[in-house]
Image (spheres, rainbow, N blue to C red):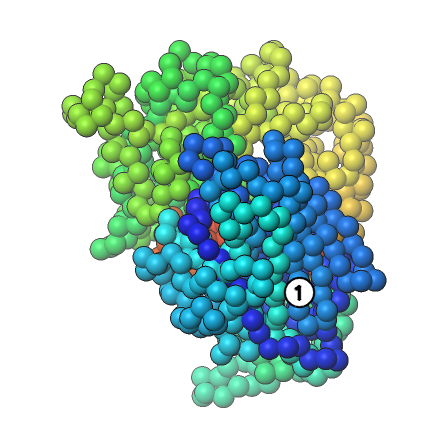
Amino acid sequence: MFRRIAFSLLSAFIVLAAPMAAANEGITLNEQEYFSGPGFSFLLFHNNYQVGYQGGLQMILNDERVLDSGDLFLQPKHGQPRPELRVLRREVDRAHSQATVFGEIEGWSSGYQLKVGSDGDSIFITLKLDHPLDWSKIEQAGLKINLYPGTYLSKSYQGDGGFGVFPEQYGGKTVLYGPAKMVNVAQEEPLHNFTISRQDGVLVLIDTRQGGPESWFMFAAPFAPGSQATEIGLTITPRLTPSWRRAPVIGISQVGYLPRQPKRAILEMDARDSAVEPISLYQLQSTGEKKLVKSEVPKAWGKFLRFQYAIFDFSEVQQPGVYLLEFRGQEAGPFQIAEAVADEAWQPTLEYFLPIQMCHVAVKEGLRTWHGPCHLDDALQAPAHKMWIDGYQQGEHETKYADNEHIPGLDWGGWHDAGDFDLPAGSIADTTLGLALAQEEFHPSLDETSIRRSEREVLLHQKDGKQDLLQQIEFGAESMLASYRIAGHIFPGIIESSEQGYNYLGDPVNITDNRIYDAKLKPSAVEGMHSGKLDDRWVFTNRNTGLQYEVAQSLAAASRVLRGYNDALADESLKTAEQLWQYEQTHAPDFAPNSYAPRNDGGFHSQELAATAELLITTGEAEYRDRLIALLPILQGISGEQFGTGPGWVLARALSKLDNSEFKSVIREVAEKWKIVADQRAATNPWGVHYPPQVSNPEYKLETRSGIHSSFVWGEGWRLQEDALHHYYLHKVFPDLFGAAPVFGTVDFVLGAHPANNRSFVSGVGAESALAAYGFNRADWSNIPGGVISGASLIKPDYMELKKFPFLWYQTEYVIGGAATYIFDVLATQKLASQ
């Protein structure tokens, strides 16, 4: 899911100018080392994920992050390597309202500084190089900062360099404005109006979307080519509105509530605000009237990060119907209170999203084709010693196949992992496990999809007499078994063999020619189902011990629910799980690094414990029980967090198969440790979810991590869903320790009761939902019904954000694992509410 965004500057840059701030409330440098004013924040490398437009110098203006990724830029001459930048430290002088970020140009023995100050009305940025540029290596260089398109499409810009309107799509014009000294942005939009100016040179406004719609606009302040200058200065003046207050957000489950479940609306308000007026709950009447059901002043909760919160509890309202909430001119709903709410919430994920993510098939819905039968030429052995996109790595070959040689048998099974088209075994294992446990625990019934293997065709909304959930479990198991049939171990994954293919937008049937590559043919030659075109995906094949155990666990669970539906596949799944486990028990562990493959956990044996417990649950055989007991000394020394975020929930499920009092006592003891941690995490936020400390108590210091080391920028929705699945089983085994509230709270959170806004994370589910998401159809600002995004993410140190923009994968991307845990969690609330 980590993306590479092409960065090509042509020449030029931009500057803006805006009305002066009110004299009585201005911009200051605060204790968290960023500049703040009424409705205004300017961050200084508190984040550093610039590949995703989330880092560097950042500006938030009246609840919208409008500028991002401010930094030095260096564009090398043709044939020269692109210099890598690294930030080192931040120094702050609050007395003089100044801060400096120090960075270095790796390999150049040279550094640079970004000095930022304020006079209360404006932000002053000075880029200072330690040495003049070596123009024999550099084509262009300067100071750049990106402008968020979502806020400014069809808004104006004007200044001494002309005027214009930000285009909705790229129109062939790269330099929109300049060279100039200043530009005024969105003068007609008071809340998001600002100017940017430069006195020591020129600015240019660039439309960087030539390569695709995911890019942003850019202001660039370049050094003159050949110049020996070492400094560039920019001034940004926002239109401050001291009287502005952020409108309250009424956080609810957008789909509604089961009659007997807890029901809470979480009010999110401006930091300078408080809830002193009542919030009102109305039931809509068939006569056209609204019936007031409850009205009271919500209970103040306090401050979480940037905003104030209050809670309105209406759990006692159980009358089925359609409802609205109103508070201070804001409205949330309509939402239902009904027994059917849960089914309406989870079924679109199984009816639409999972079938549409299926690889190697065409997916059709009536007259619509979601995508054609793709990647029928899977897959080529990845070249030895290949470091590739998204963390995929190939070491020495462990198969009999040579570089770029076709490995047969990989052209059936598995889902496209996310908004891209790879098939990572770790994700497929997690997804299959979640679906299998949902089937086993809740036995849902749904038949809305036909899967025709011989025709490689999936038909939505056409019944075939088979349970859809079992068919999806079957498809996941087939994918995992494929590599074991070939090599006796699980391959980490399959991914496009070119960056163009990886970044492709549209129907995946067009990424490859769907003909098996034959090196003996000329590139344009075709012979039957073979061609000379080297476009087939690569399969990465090194064994990873943690991944072998993960797949063993998943296949063991799948075998239980496939029994009686597809007995041959159930037998093969269980046999393979046992053989994977046995092999790893008798061979030295190898944690070959790879995408979605576990790293060595320092002897904790997390994946081994989970696989062993799952196999014990499945078979009841003594060798698995004995191995768990042998690992008891390790379990005695683990922390509560290791238990709760690791294999604790699986071990708890296996207790009924273990007649060992010491083991049961140890598991309860570490469960009690986790309860303390879990309760503390739930208490840090008004939603009662288990936010990790990096969200509830984030750092404000300079962020040096970037690129693939920045996984912390993602929204927490998927991890919270996984946590809720684990919590469900801990509640089931230890009801005296763990209550059901976090499961209900997490589902409400995903469906709209979360920070930043109240849109459901599930596309098409609820009155307001993520209708522009990072699926394979994102270029159309569209969505896949039932897909689950990761949701609101933290812009450190204190701003939660969920933009309505389909190209921010760390907020709006779908993943298959998130779909599985979401289905499980919703079904869990249905069962818990009925008890």
137 or 593, nearer to the observer: 137
- Is residue 85 visible in the rendered image? The answer is yes
The residue at which mark 1 appears reads as: 123
**Location of residue 214 in the rendering, given as x and y in whole percent from the top left corner:** 43, 53
Q: Which residue type does callout 1 highlight?
A: Ile
Q: Residue at x 65, y 25 (%)?
A: 600
Q: Position of residue 585 (x, y in %)?
A: 62, 15
Q: Position of residue 220 (x, y in %)?
A: 51, 56
Identify the image quadrant of the C terminus.
bottom right
10 Å crowding of disc 1: few (<14), some (14-19), many (20+): many
Which residue appears at 23% of the width and 16% of the height?
A: 520
Residue 253's spot in the image, x, y percent? 56, 65
Name the side, left or right, on which 740 lies relative to 465: right
In this view, 269 is above or below 467: below
Query: Outermost residue, right direction?
Result: 95
What residue lies at 17% left-to-right and 26% top-to-bottom?
A: 526
Q: Quadrant of residue 197?
A: bottom right
